[in-house]
Image (cartoon, grey):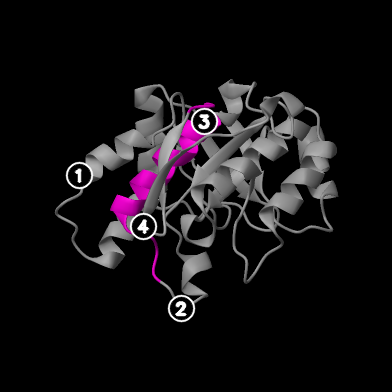
Amino acid sequence: MDFGIVHAKIDEIGYITHAENLGYTHCWVTDSQMIRSNCWAVLALAAQQTRRMRLGTGVNVPGLRLAPVAANGIATINRLAPGRCFIGLGTGHTAMRTLGQKPMRLGPFKEYVQTVRALLRGEEVDYTLNGETHPIRFQMREHRFIDLDHTDAVGQVIDHPQLVADGAQRDGPQPDVDRAAVADSVATRTEQLHPVVGHVGDCDETSREDCHRSHRSGFKQRIMLRLLGVRQCLGP
């Protein structure tokens, strides 16, 4: 079992370095513009002050930026920490609701994830913006402004299935979208991300179920530990 931290305070990057020295393997940086520090600035500093820890967003919110911008963001961080980066995507609750907006619906969310994934793989993709569709891809890659070469890490687009389900529930029924297909299209190749945050010993039935399910299916369970509050998931 691997352990990671959630962090998003620009002037306390030392906590991330300290966590790496203690053996923590992952750091998720939240994307909540009305509450916390900018996720890309935090990740850039963390990339320069760590050597082994996997770094990424937990999670990026599609409603805040265009898909090519999100892909460029994590590919830029991957230039500083090659092979150690991942990007998490969610429909967006806190970040959008603090703007008085609803989370992204499943149809647009699926398209967003597919665009990010294709761009991070170095592929050309048909991208629609303001009613116009054009083929796009990252250009001038020989100048290494971004890093797509270490694709084993940066090519992993992680989505939290529960965030997808929550987005559908809050926005009402969407019969034209196959929720199972959406979850499948954004699932990580080799791991399942299920953030759990709270207090030590306060492990509810949902968290226990996730631990048991990940154990049975052979997935590694990533438990995210906040610096000031932890929920332990005690599985077999």
x, y (%) of residue 208? Answer: 40, 43
Indicate the secondary structure of the residue bearing disc 1: loop
Q: Residue at x 47, y 60 (%)?
A: 63
Alpha-carbon span between mark 3 and mark 4? 29 Å
Reading the image, the residue beneath label 3 is 156
Q: Looking at the rendering, which quadrant does residue 79 occupy?
A: top right
Alpha-carbon span between mark 2 and mark 4? 25 Å
**Which quadrant does the N terminus fall into?**
top right
Q: Is residue 106 magenta?
A: yes
**Which of the two discs, 3 and 4, sits closer to the camera?**
4
Q: Is residue 1 magenta?
A: no
x, y (%) of residue 78? Answer: 69, 33
Alpha-carbon span between mark 3 and mark 2? 31 Å
Magenta-drawn stretch, dominant element (helix, strand or loop): helix
CA neighbours of label 4 inside 10 A, class few (<14), some (14 to 19), many (20+): few
Tell whether 126 sits left or right of 62.
left
Alpha-carbon span between mark 3 and mark 1? 22 Å
- Pointers 3 and 4 in contact (C-beta within 8 Å): no
Reading the image, the residue beneath label 2 is 100
Q: Is residue 181 visible?
A: yes
Indicate the secondary structure of the residue bearing disc 2: loop
Q: Residue at x 41, y 53 (%)?
A: 204
The three-letter amino acid code for the residue at tag 1 is Asp
- Pointers 3 and 1 in contact (C-beta within 8 Å): no
Reading the image, the residue beneath label 1 is 178
Alpha-carbon span between mark 1 and mark 4? 24 Å
Reading the image, the residue beneath label 4 is 131
First in sequence, mark 1 or 4: give its number.
Answer: 4
**Which of the two discs, 1 and 4, sits closer to the camera?**
4
